[in-house]
Each structure stands twice: as C-alpha cells, then as structure tokens.
C-alpha cells in the first residue's frame, strides 16, 4: 500500500468530523448538498438487508476509519470487528468505543480552527464492537467469515485491490451479505494504473464477484468531506449489496 497519509493529525481531524460531526458542524450553508451528509451512517443503513441477518450473526467493517459505520452495524449483530490500516484511526475508534469523547480541530481557514468533540451516539451499543489494525490486502489468517461484510470507499485506495477481491468469498458466509461502496476514484497515488479496472468499476466488480456473489441491490450514495469552511469534496459513491451464493 502507498505511504499511509491517514496517520496525520489533519486527516484524523477531518475523519472525526466526517464520521461524528453534526449536520450543522459539517455544513452550515443552507444551499449546500445536505443529502450528502452522514455517509458513514447511510453506507450501512441504506444498503443492509435487515431481514436476512441470522441469529448470533457477526459483522466485519473493512476500512472502518474512526469507526462510525462499525457502531452503526452494532445493533443488528452480536459482534462487530472493525479493521483499518491506520493505527491512529484505530486508536481513536478504540477510545470512542471505551466511551471517551475526543476533541479535535475543525479547520476554518488558514490557521484558524474550532475545537469540536466526537463521541458515539448514545443510542448505539459499544460493548459488542472491537477494532484492530490490519491491511485489507493481507488480512490475518483465522479472521473467519461473517454474516455481513461492509467495505466503504476502500477498493480505490488499495495498491492491489485484486487481493481483497480474491479474499472476499472466504470472508462472507453463504447467504451473507457484502456491502460495498466506491466513488471509483482511481488515482496513481494509491493504485498503480496497471491495477485499475480496464472498463467501469461496476463491470469489473460484476466480473470478479459473479461466480460467488449475486448483485441484488445498487444505488448512488453522495458524500461530502469538508476541507475548510468554504471548500468541500462532493462525491458520489456507487453502493451495492451482494449475497454470497
């Protein structure tokens, strides 16, 4: 994988805001794209099929960042494992899991910042969530298989996404669901061009996964990352739910 930029304080602050900031904290502009807020929540709640989750189910959240999607999965399963490549993100997620409130800086402009606080919403369980550092391209042996695997906006940040694709069938139990989102943002800074899909990302995933998964749902999921008070990244992820055959 490329050098991990996600160990920086700036990115940690940005992702704490992205995952835990209120709508007003992220986007105070009335004319802004409000529908793009809360992506870490929507990437779970708008894709998951609650009717096919069995009793005693477990979930895996790959590329969990600072953990919000892992906590969103927690009410529906007995145990959630969140894995991220950034040790700094994992440390923050573990602090939040322990009930801590984390202070962070929201950039306004130049060197001007505002101190905000991130915490897990009180309606979400924390006791059945655990986090660990790991590489999605080289996951540890014995990780097991899960009723739900969630991987949001991860594929196009991997040096060799094919390695994760090949591991996915063993991670999802037969009848289980794979929740994938990707903005299809292939950049040489993260993924060598020779490892990009040759056509569309959707067609590539269909080709790669169709032997062991059935694509049963897809939708567009806009999301918004705030850089400073007057600059944002607005993107649209392709969201999909796959059922393990």
Image (tube, grey):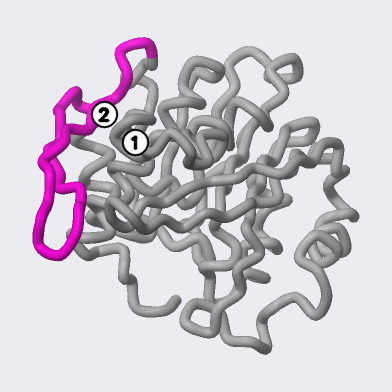
| Quadrant where the C terminus is found in the figure | top right
Drawn side of residue 237 relative to residue 65, left or right: right
Secondary structure at badge 2 equals: helix
| Residue range highlighted in magenta | 97-123
| Picture coordinates of residue 31, whole percent (x, y) | 48, 38
Q: Which one is in front in this view, the residue at disc 1 or the one at disc 2? A: 1
| Residue at image mark 1 | 28
Of callouts 1 and 2, which one flags the residue occurring earlier in the amino acid sequence?
A: 1
Q: Is residue 28 above or below residue 57?
A: below
Drawn side of residue 26 relative to residue 162, left or right: left
The residue drawn where x is 29% and y is 35% is: 25
Give the quarter of the image for residue 56.
top right
Categorize mark 1 by other alpha carbons within 10 Å: few (<14), some (14-19), many (20+): few
The residue drawn where x is 38% and y is 30% is: 23
Name the residue nearer the viewer: 59 or 3. 3
| Picture coordinates of residue 235, whole percent (x, y) | 57, 55
The residue drawn where x is 37% and y is 11% is: 123
| Residue at image mark 2 | 97
The residue drawn where x is 19% and y is 23% is: 99
| Picture coordinates of residue 189, whole percent (x, y) | 47, 82
| Picture coordinates of residue 84, whole percent (x, y) | 39, 53
């Amino acid at each position: 994988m490329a050098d991990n930029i996600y160990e920086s304080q700036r990115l940690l602050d940005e992702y704490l805001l992205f995952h835990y900031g209120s709508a007003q904290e992220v986007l105070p502009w009335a004319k802004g794209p409000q529908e793009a807020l809360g992506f870490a929540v929507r990437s779970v709640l708008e894709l998951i099929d609650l009717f096919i989750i069995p009793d005693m189910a477990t979930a895996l959240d790959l590329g969990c960042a600072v953990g919000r999607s892992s906590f969103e999965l927690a009410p529906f399963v007995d145990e959630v494992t969140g894995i991220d490549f950034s040790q700094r993100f994992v440390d923050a997620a573990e602090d939040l899991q322990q009930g801590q409130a984390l202070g962070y800086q929201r950039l306004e402009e130049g060197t001007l910042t505002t101190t905000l606080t991130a915490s897990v919403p009180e309606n979400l369980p924390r006791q059945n969530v655990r986090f660990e550092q790991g590489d999605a391209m080289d996951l540890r042996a014995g990780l097991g298989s899960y009723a739900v695997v969630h991987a949001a906006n991860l594929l196009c940040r991997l040096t060799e996404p094919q390695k994760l694709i090949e591991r996915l069938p063993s991670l999802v139990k037969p009848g289980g669901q794979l929740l994938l989102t990707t903005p299809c943002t292939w950049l040489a800074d993260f993924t060598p061009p020779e490892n990009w899909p040759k056509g569309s990302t959707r067609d590539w995933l269909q080709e790669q996964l169709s032997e062991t998964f059935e694509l049963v749902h897809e939708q567009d999921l806009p999301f918004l990352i705030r850089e400073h008070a007057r600059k944002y990244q607005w993107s649209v992820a392709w969201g999909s739910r796959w059922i393990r055959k």
